[in-house]
Structure formats: structure tokens, C-alpha cells
Amino acid sequence: MAIQKPYADYDWYKTNYFGSAIPEEAFPSFAMKASYLVDGLTAGNLQPLDAAPDCVKDAVCAAAEKLYQFEQSPAKEIKSENNDGYSVTYADASEEKARDDAKTEIRVYLSTSGLLFRGCRKRC
């Protein structure tokens, strides 16, 4: 089943997560992307729940911030530098790295929730 709306809204982001990095008009898009990442990592464990638990909302906010920060400021990490004639090579920032960072944030928030469990919950 496809996600109909993000697991966290801007009100939650501001008042419970205490976020400030993402402007209100940009939040829904990044929260939706983060919600899809949460769904992928939880392997459908959120489907039977009536509402997203607070830890899921926080995970979405943290991941959304990572995705937003990546889009706003492309990484300028120096890969190599040569001062003989001065040359700087910057590392490539990839969207995959941003997703990996967002997934790491999600795992932090959901690590003790049981939602990341992919095994058999019923007697096999």
C-alpha cells in the first residue's frame, strides 16, 4: 500500500522535534521522501498500526533534515589539494550518500522500537 501522506507534519517538526532547518513550504516534500525511506526500512511493519508512533515521526523529521541539507548545500569536501600551482579537487556528493545518511538517522530513532525487525512475528 502506498503512503498517502508523510508520517510527520510540519507542526510535529516544529513543536515536538524542535526542528528549524527546513522551511514550512519545503517540509512536505522532504517528509514524504523520508517517509518512503522509513517504509522501506520497516518492511511494512507500520501497515497494521492506526497511527505512526512518535519515534517514527521523529525519524521522518531527522531524515528529512538530512535530505534537505544535502539538496541545499552540495558537499564541498576536498578530495585532493595541490599548492604547486594551486589546484583543489572536490569530492562528488551523491544522492545515494544523502539517502544513506538519512537511513542512518532513521535507524537511530527506530533501533529500539521493534519496527526494523524483518523476521517472522508469528509462530513459523
Image (spheres, helix red, strand yellow):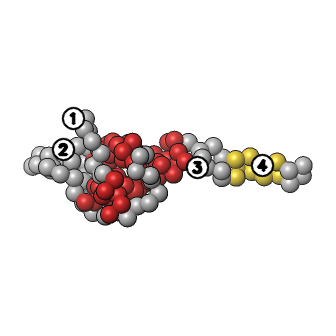
Determine which residue is flagged by label 1: 1
Residue pictured at 30% horizontal, 58% vertical:
12
On screen, residue 14 above or below 96: below
Q: Position of residue 66 (x, y in %)?
A: 46, 52
Residue pictured at 34% horizontal, 53% vertical:
10
Determine which residue is flagged by label 4: 88
Sequence-wise, the earlier of marks 2 and 3 is 2
Q: Nearer the viewer, residue 8 or 66?
A: 8
Q: Distance from label 3 to label 1 (Cα)?
A: 33 Å
The three-letter amino acid code for the residue at tag 4 is Val
Q: Distance from label 3 to label 4 (Cα)?
A: 18 Å
Q: Position of residue 85 (x, y in %)?
A: 90, 49
- The quadrant in which residue 15 appears is bottom left
Q: Distance from label 1 to label 2 (Cα)?
A: 8 Å
Q: Nearer the viewer, residue 3 or 18?
A: 18
Sequence-wise, the earlier of marks 1 and 2 is 1
Q: Are marks 1 and 2 in contact (CB under 8 Å)?
A: yes
Q: Position of residue 59 (x, y in %)?
A: 34, 56
Provide the secondary structure element on which disc 2 rests: loop
Q: Is residue 25 visible to us here?
A: yes
Determine which residue is flagged by label 2: 47
> Is the residue marked by circle 2 packed among few (<14), some (14-19), or many (20+) residues within 10 Å?
some
> Is the residue marked by circle 3 packed among few (<14), some (14-19), or many (20+) residues within 10 Å?
few
Which residue occupies the extreme top position in the image? 1
Determine which residue is flagged by label 3: 73
The three-letter amino acid code for the residue at tag 2 is Gln
The three-letter amino acid code for the residue at tag 1 is Met
Q: Which mark is residue 42?
A: none
Q: Is 118 situated left or right of 26 in this image?
A: left
